[in-house]
Amino acid sequence: MTDHAVVIAGGGPTGLMLGGELALAGVDVAIVERRASQGLIGSRAGGLRSRTIEVLDQRGIADRFLSQGQVAQVAGFAWIRLNISDFPTRHNYGLALRQNHIERILADWVGELAVPIYRARDVTGFAQDETGVAVELSDGESLRADYLVGCDGGRSLVRKAAGIEFRGWDPTISNLIAEVELAEEPEWGLRRDASGIHSLSRTENEGPVRVLVTEQSLDRAGEPTLRDLSEAMVAVYGTDYGVHSPIWISRFTDMVPTGGVLPQRTRAAGRRLCTRALPRGRTGPQHRCAGCGQSGMEAGPGGQGNVSP
């Protein structure tokens, strides 16, 4: 059994940033990640906002991201575009850079800090005692740590196994976001109606189509299917444009957790954990976006800056 001071479940943007922060503080930290590499299926989120770039700059790594993306004015409020070029910050702009590149750069940084990443395996369970946590992995191995940190997504096994409730306001809207292929030319761009906000756009010049569409009911549960997406598109557009070959499909709501109590020695950290029972008392929606996946991805790295071990 290998010992670490902290084990992080999940090697996405949140887990990587937290791992880097703890390593800089001299903490023996390791990350457990289900993917065999840092590669992503699909493009996911599309960039970084000003505050996230500032946090990366505090760690001396902002230029790594800036050199591979394109700066732009992306701030806005209530669909009103805002120009922040005169704001008193070195980074008064956003950055267009896909999440697969963002994760790759973060993983390279974490590697330079000698943080071990146990790849191609999941955290499947854990047992706590007075001295720490025994962490069970999907390959039959186990790790020992003073603390286990759950950065394993909105359906976090760590949160559920720790008994941390997902308490808060009930959702009022359910959305599907996906990257797919369409057999017919669609109605490109944003659409707003009584049911919500919808969009159809290309992720690249000849890449897959990014779909954001509101579902007509809140009673769907589990992993979304191509049929779910087709039905939602027909309800909004009157057709599904011959949707096929999904790269990925995700469901999210506007549920807002309000907090809870953390059991001893189990720390839940990170926006993508999606429980508001956090050590620093942060609150926010599960995953709300306007078709780009930004909220979920960016709040993770931003929330881990200056973390105290």
Image (spheres, rainbow, N blue to C red):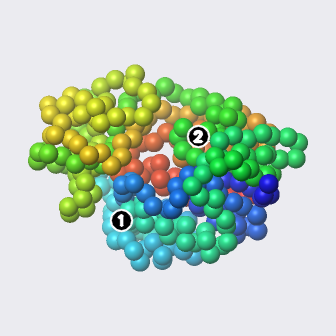
Circle 1 or circle 2, nearest the eye: 2
Image spot of residue 245 (x, y percent): 26, 46
Amino acid found under the numbered disc labelled 2: Ser
Image spot of residue 202 (x, y percent): 23, 55
Instruction: Pick whichever, 144 or 259, lies toward us.
Output: 144
Label 1 crowding class (10 Å Cα cut-off): few <14, some 14-19, many 20+? some
Residue at horizontal 39%, vertical 54%?
41
**C-alpha gap between disc 1 and disc 2:** 28 Å
* Residue 85 in the image: above or below residue 219: below
Say if residue 84 shows up in the picture: no
* Residue 269 in the image: above or below residue 309: above
* Residue 136 in the image: above or below residue 52: above
Residue at horizontal 38%, vertical 30%?
173
Image spot of residue 199 (x, y percent): 24, 44
Image spot of residue 55 (x, y percent): 55, 65
The image quarter in which residue 107 lies: bottom right
Residue under label 2, please give it.
156
Residue under label 1, please give it.
96
Residue at horizontal 38%, vertical 34%?
224
